[in-house]
Amino acid sequence: MRDEDKAYYSENCRICHAPFTIENYMVAEMMFGFRDKFSYQQCSSCGCLQITELPSNIEKYYPPHYYSFTQQIPKLRRLPFFKRLFAEMRLKKKYGQNLDILKHLKPVNAKINYRILDVGCGRGRLICELFNQGFKNVSGIDKFIPQEIKYDFGVKILKKELTDLQSNSYDVITMHHVLEHIDQQHKTIKDCYDLLKKNGCLVLGVPLLATAWEEYKHNWVQLDAPRHYFLHTVKSITILAETNGFEIKHSMFDSTSFQFWGSEFYKRDIPLFTEENNYGFYPVEKLFNNTQIEGFENRAKELNRLGKGDSGVFYLYKK
């Protein structure tokens, strides 16, 4: 074990500091079928599942064909002058239409001129789509990109740490399925708190330990060893938020049928992405018919309604 790994290793939960349960879970990397195994421990109090030791070669598990590196970026377009005059009115109408790109901003009632930062944004697909919806002040940050990216109309993806940015300068910060990849959980949430204006909102999307975890355990697809260091519960997210000065005012569950058919892949020792499929998804229809897939989708919707979906979005407001 390297010195830095020893520093990371803990006998207690890194979220609430309670002891871990006795049971260890050995989880194989299955997204690409490496099948290397990693140890995870679960907190006896908040329930958060955590990788025991940081991998010394984590870059191996983010190959060039990892999906966030290959995302398609839409061409940026500025709204025509007349539409810009009525951009706020158009945005309210689009919130009413519940468009996918805007559904996570709808509870915030984000305005056209809000300063929005997307953390861990990769090549920046989300902020480019938001710009095309009329948002004027969008940017992204990702310390793992090779270099800063400059798109048209001043839209940028910064290669920086959160602490390099100016405090109290953003209305909304989004982190969509990024937090689980980060080892320093409390520091990251505190850094976001510092960057937000008073009453600003951190929109936090994460996988959640719920029914799919209980059913599949080490085969649960969203465990995603070793890329996911932390798999949270609603309780552990609440502790993480409140410890760092936030108040959770709203939450939603947005899990999909993926929690079932993806986990069934792993249960059958089938990777999600294979070279034979040009690193696209293994064809779902090879294992399941339309009726079965529809059943997965309906079950996911019901779990979301019950607050037991395996993916959630939390709205953390700076007090």
Image (cartoon, grey):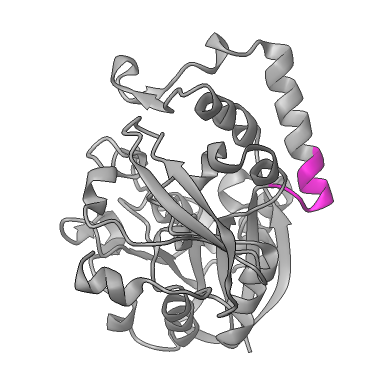
Q: Position of residue 28 (x, y in %)?
A: 41, 39
Q: Residue at x 40, y 73 (%)?
A: 184
In the picture, measured across the screen, residue 318 lies left or right of residue 84, that is right
Could you tell me which quadrant the C terminus lies in? Answer: bottom right
Q: Is residue 166 visible?
A: yes
Q: Residue at x 76, y 50 (%)?
A: 308
Range of residues picked out in magenta: 302-309
Asked if residue 317 lies in the magenta stretch, the reply is no
* Most foreground residue, 113 or 150: 150
Q: Is residue 101 above or below residue 29?
A: below
Q: Is residue 274 above or below residue 234?
A: above
Question: Among all residues in the image, which is located at the extreme front?
Answer: 22
Q: Residue at x 83, y 49 (%)?
A: 306
* Most foreground residue, 291 or 118: 291
Q: Position of residue 43 (x, y in %)?
A: 60, 67
Q: Is residue 145 above or below residue 125?
A: below
* Most foreground residue, 313 or 185: 185
In the picture, measured across the screen, residue 186 lies left or right of residue 149, that is right
